[in-house]
Image (cartoon, grey):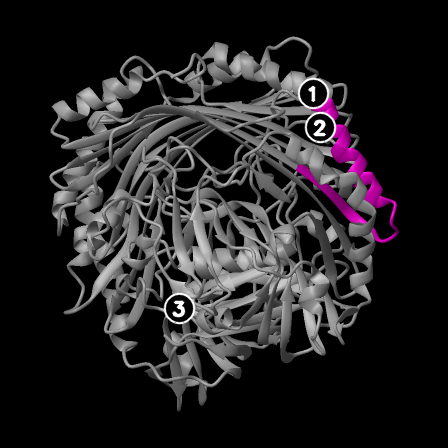
Amino acid sequence: MTDDDIGAEPCRRALEVARAAGASYADARLVDLESEHLAVRDGEVQGVGQTSSLGLGVRVLRDGCWGFAATGDLGPRAAEDAARLAVEVAAAGRATRRAPVRLAPVEPVEASWATPVVEDPFAVALDDKLALLVAASRAMLEVDGVSPAEARQHAWRRRSRIVSSEGTDVAQTIVQCGAGIAATAVGEAETQVRSYPNSFGGDFGSEGYELVRRLDLVGHAPRVAEEAVELLSAPACPAAATTLVLDGSQVALQVHESIGHPVELDRVLGMEAAYAGTSFLTPGDTGRLRYGSPRLSVLANATTPGALGTFGYDDEGVPATSTPIVTEGVFQGFLSSRETAAEVGLARSGATVRAQSWAHLPLIRMTNVSLEAGTAGSLDELLDGIDRGLYLETNRSWSIDDRRVDFQFGTEWGREIRHGRLGRVVRNGTYGGRTLPFWASLDAVGGPALWKAWGLPNCGKGQPGQVGYVAHGAAPARFLDVAVGSTR
Amino acid sequence: MREPWGADHLHHLLDAALGIDGADQVEARAVHAWGGLARFARSTVHQHVAGDDTTVSVRVVTRGRVGVASTNEVNPAGVAATGERALASARLSPPDPTFPGLAGPAPLPPVGPRFDAATAAASPERRSRAVARLLARLGPGQEAAGALSTGATEVALATTAGARLHGLATRAAVSTVVTGAGASGHAEEAAVALDALSPAEVGARAAGTAEAAVDPRTPVPGDHEVVLLPAAVATLLDHLAPAFSAKTVAEGRSPFSDRMGEAVVSPLLDLADDALSEGALGVPFDGEGTPKVRVPLLDGGVVRGLVHDRASAAAAGTHSTGHGLPAPNPFGPWPSHLALAPGATGVEELVGGIERGLLVTRFWYTREVNPKRTLLTGMTRDGTFLIEGGRRGPAVRNLRYNQSIVEALATCDGVGDRAATTSDEGGHIRAPALRLRSFRFTSASDH
C-alpha cells in the first residue's frame, strides 16, 4: 500500500458486520470517483462539469444467495448499515433460490496498483484544456456549411479499495481520459457528421493528458469539417455484395458487438437474458467452434499498456490477465467471473468483473478484447487486388440481435474501391450480416503498424444500467462478399 | 435511509452553495435517491441490489462565465466547497454569451399522487415476494428473466434568482422476458406504487406470448402491413423524441425543421409531452427548476409544438416548457413524458383490418441510421406473429427493420384503444397499439 491509497477501515468494518450477520462470503469496495467533462460547441464553451462521488458497496453471500447494498452516506454507521442491508437482501433470495452460488478459488492478495500517467489530466490548467477545444471547434467552423462544430474532453480518476473476507486487500487508482471532435453539416434531406479520431466522443485510454495532446485535434479539424460538407453531396452507398475494407475503429466496434459481447459468460448462461440478451455460444463450444477464418485471432488482455480496459485487479480482487478468445479462427474461451467460472467448471476467474462505481454490482465486462494484428503493412496493401469494393470508416450506428448474430452497422465515411484504389466518396455507408459467416469472410488484417487500441467508454449493461470502459485493439481489415447498402 | 429528508433539510444544504462569495448567480440542486432492484434470470433472483445516495450539483455564473460541479458529500461544508469548485471553473471558462440566466420563483402545477411511502420503504423481502408471484405464473418448461424495482427520488432545487422547489416521487416497475421451447414473450408495467403493479399478470402475459410463439416460421422480408403493440410503438416514439427539441429544430437537424404547422404523419395521431397527466412519474419541474408544462407536439398529425429549456427558449424569444436537463447540458431540451393519445379500436380489430401482415410485440437494439429522415434499424423480439385473414397467426422468427418513423406513422390507419406505459430511469412513454400500412423489414434472423 502507498500513502495515496484510499483507506480500508470502512471496508473492514463492513466485513465484520456482514460476517456477524451470517454472510459466508463478503467483499467491500470503497470507491472515490472524480470526473471532468468539457464541451465546446461552435467555438463557445458549452459546459464545464466536474463531479466527485465517494461511497461504499458491500457484496455478500448468505445461504448461497448474493446480496448487494451501497451507500454514498459515509457517516459513522454507514458501513454497518450497508453490510446489514446487504445481508437482508441476500436473505430475501431464499424465496426463489435454486442452486447455491459457488465461487472459483482465488489466491488472496494484498497489493496496490496505479495507471502509469505522464501528465495528470486533472492537473492540467482548465483554461489550457478549454483553449485546445475552442481552437479545434473554431478550425472546423471556418469551413462553410459546418455547424455545430463540437469538441469534447473527458477525464476520470477512480481510487478504490477492495477488501474481502478471504483476505484480499487491493488498492487501485485508475486514470482515464480522452477527447474528440465532430463536425455536422446540415442539408435539405440529410444531416452528415464527421468525427475524429472516432465517433461518440473520440478516443479514450488509461493514460494521462498526453493522450489528448497526441491526438492533434486542431490539426485534424479542417479535414473533418470538409469531409462533413463533402458528404452532403456525395452519392448514396450502393446496395451490393462486395469486398469490404473497414478502418480500425469500425473493426473495433465489430469486435465489440459480435465477439466481445457473445463471449461474456453471464450472457451465455442466461443471466442477462432480459436486458442485454443472451449469446449464440454455449459452454461446449470451447475449443470446437470455428468462429472465423484462420486470420481471426482475438485476445482479452487487461494488461495492454494505455488501453481503456486496462487495470491491475478486477473488482473481485483477481489479478488482471490475458485470455485467448479465438485462435486462428477457433473459439477458445469466455470472459468470466468467479461465479460463472465455477458454474462451467473453469479453474479460475478470467478477471473481468468490474462495476461502474461503488453504487453498482460488479459484472463481467470486456477488458481489452483485441483482434490481433495481421500482416498487411498498409491500407494500400489491403486494397491491392480489389477490383470493385467499398471502404467504410468511423461508426455512425450499430444494431445487433439479442443473441449477437444478425447485425447492421452504419458508418460516417465511405469510399468506393476501384482497381485497388480508393475512388469517389459515398454517404450513408452501411453493411450487415451474421456473426460467424462474417468473420469467416475475414481475408486480411493490417499489421502492427496499423494496429491500435480503441477505447469505448459507453458500453451499457446490467440493471440498474451501468457503463463500462473497454477497449479493442484493431487494425483495418478486409472482408469478402459482404452485403452493403441494404437500407432504404 | 428509506425515507425523505424533507424540503427544509435539503434547502438548508443548498443554501451553503447559494451564499458563496464572488458569484453573480448560483443554482444548487440536490437529488436524494434510494431503493432496490431484484433482478432475476433462469427463474431465480440472481442479482438483488439496494442502496442510497444524495448528489448535490452547483452551477455558478460569474461575469457571464458558467461552471458546474457536483458532489455526494452532503453537508454544508461539502456543498459550499463544491460551489467554490464550480466558481473556480467558471472563472477559468470563457464567457457564454448565450447563457439565459437562472430560473426564478414559479408555482408548481397541480399533479396527482407521485409519491407512495410504502413503495419508498419497500424491503428486499417484498421485492422478492413480488418476483415469486410472477414466476408462479410460468408454464411447464418456461423460465423467466427480468427485474422488479422500487425507487424513491427526492429533488430540491434553489437559485439566487428565487426558485425554491422540492419534489418527491416513487417509481415501481416490473419487466420480464419469458422463454421456453425456443420462443420468448415480454411484458412490463410501471407505476407510482408497487401495489399498483400486477407481477402475476405480467408473468402470465409474457408466458402466454412465449407459449404462442413456439415453432416460428421463417418470414419473408419486405414491406408489410403491421400492428405494433404498445412497447414497439414506444420504441419508435422514443427515437422520435429529439425531433421535437427546439434546439434540434433550430439547428436544422430535425425532420420537422421548417415544418411547423404542416401535416407530417397520419391525422389519427395526437402526441403530447405530458408530465402532468394522471399516472405520470417523476417530479413536476425540470433540471433547471422550471415547472413542467403539457406541450402538444402533434395535433391530428400536424406539428404543433416543441419542447424548450431556458437556453432554447431565450434563443427563440419564448418561455421554457420545463424540459431542461440538469447542467451541464450540451444536448438541449428533451421530451421525457411522451404520450400518444389512444384511439377507439381494440387490438383484435386492428389485426382484423389486415389480410396478411405482421404483429410485433416489441423492438430491440434500435439505432438511428439517418436521423434527419428518422430512419431506424433494429430487430423484432419476444413475440412476432403473422397476421393471416385478419387474425393472429403462427409465430415467425425475428426480423430486422430499416424504416423511417415519420414515413411509417404517415401510413397509420388505426390506433389502439388502450395505452400502456413503458418506463425507464430516464422517463416514460404512454402509447397504444398502432396499425401501419407499410413497414420495411430487410432481413430475417435464425431465432
The chain holding disc 2 is A
Taking the spot 43% from the left edge, 68% from the top edge, the residue there is: A405
On-image quarter of the C terminus of chain B: bottom left
Report whether residue B297 is seen: no
The chain holding disc 1 is A
What segment is highlighted magenta in the picture? A126-152
Q: Position of residue A116 (x, y in %)?
A: 53, 28
- Foreground mark, 3 or 2? 2
Amino acid type of disc 3? Arg
A436 and B102: which one is in front?
A436
The chain holding disc 3 is B
Secondary structure beneath label 3: strand
Q: CA distance from mark 3 to mark 2?
A: 45 Å
Residue that badge 3 annotates: B381
Amino acid type of disc 1? Ala
- Does residue A139 belong to the magenta stretch? yes
State whether residue B359 is above or below residue A65: below
Taking the spot 57% from the left edge, 38% from the top edge, the residue there is: A205
Amino acid type of disc 2? Lys
State whether residue A479 is above or below residue B107: below
B227 and B385: which one is in front?
B385
Per the rendering, the mark at residue A129 is: 2
- Foreground mark, 1 or 3? 1
Residue that badge 1 annotates: A125
Taking the spot 13% from the left edge, 26% from the top edge, the residue there is: A21
- Asked if labels 1 and 2 touch by Cβ distance under 8 angstroms, the answer is yes
Q: CA distance from mark 1 to mark 3?
A: 49 Å
Q: How many marks?
A: 3
Please identify the quarter of the rendering in which residue A71 is found. Answer: top left
